[in-house]
Image (cartoon, helix red, strand yellow):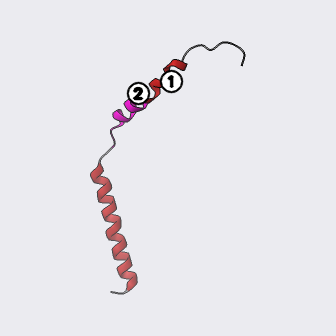
Amino acid sequence: MNRIVMSLFVGAILAASAWGIARLQGAPDVGARVRAQREALDSFAVLDGEWRGDA
């Protein structure tokens, strides 16, 4: 095979492999991500409320 055909073949193999690996990972757990974000924001709960005074 010449180099161009070989390069296209190798590129196709790499693209198919990357696609296959991405498919094996599955969908992210959205609920777990939302829970983690809420837990991270809990540390800012002390700042919630009415603020008064000169700005």
Vertical order, 24 against 45 (above or below)? below
Vertical order, 10 against 25 (above or below)? below
Quarter of the image with the C terminus is: top right
Secondary structure category for the residue under label 1: helix
Residue type beneath disc 2: Glu
Disc number placed over residue 44 in the picture, else none = 1
Q: Residue at x 72, y 15 (%)?
A: 54
Q: Are marks 2 and 1 in contact (CB under 8 Å)?
A: no
Secondary structure category for the residue under label 2: helix
Left or right, 51 with respect to 43, comes to: right
Q: The magenta stretch spans which residues?
A: 28-37
Please give the residue where the numbered disc 2 appears in the rendered image. 39
Q: Residue at x 34, y 70 (%)?
A: 12
Residue 1 x/y as whole percent = 32, 86
Residue 20 x/y as whole percent = 29, 59
Residue type beneath disc 1: Phe
Residue 42 x/y as whole percent = 45, 24
Image quadrant of residue 31? Answer: top left
Q: Residue at x 29, y 50 (%)?
A: 25
Vertical order, 21 against 52 (above or below)? below
Q: Residue at x 31, y 70 (%)?
A: 13
Residue 31 among those drawn in magenta: yes
Residue 30 x/y as whole percent = 36, 36
Vertical order, 29 against 14 (above or below)? above
Rounded to the nearest angstrom, the CA distance separating label 2 from label 1 is 10 Å
Residue 5 among those drawn in magenta: no
Q: Nearer the viewer, residue 36 or 3?
A: 36
Q: In the current view of this chain or complex, which residue is farthest to the right? A: 54
Q: Residues within 10 Å of mark 1 (few under 14, many from 20)?
A: few
Left or right, 26 with respect to 52, comes to: left
Q: In the current view of this chain or complex, which residue is farthest to the left? A: 24
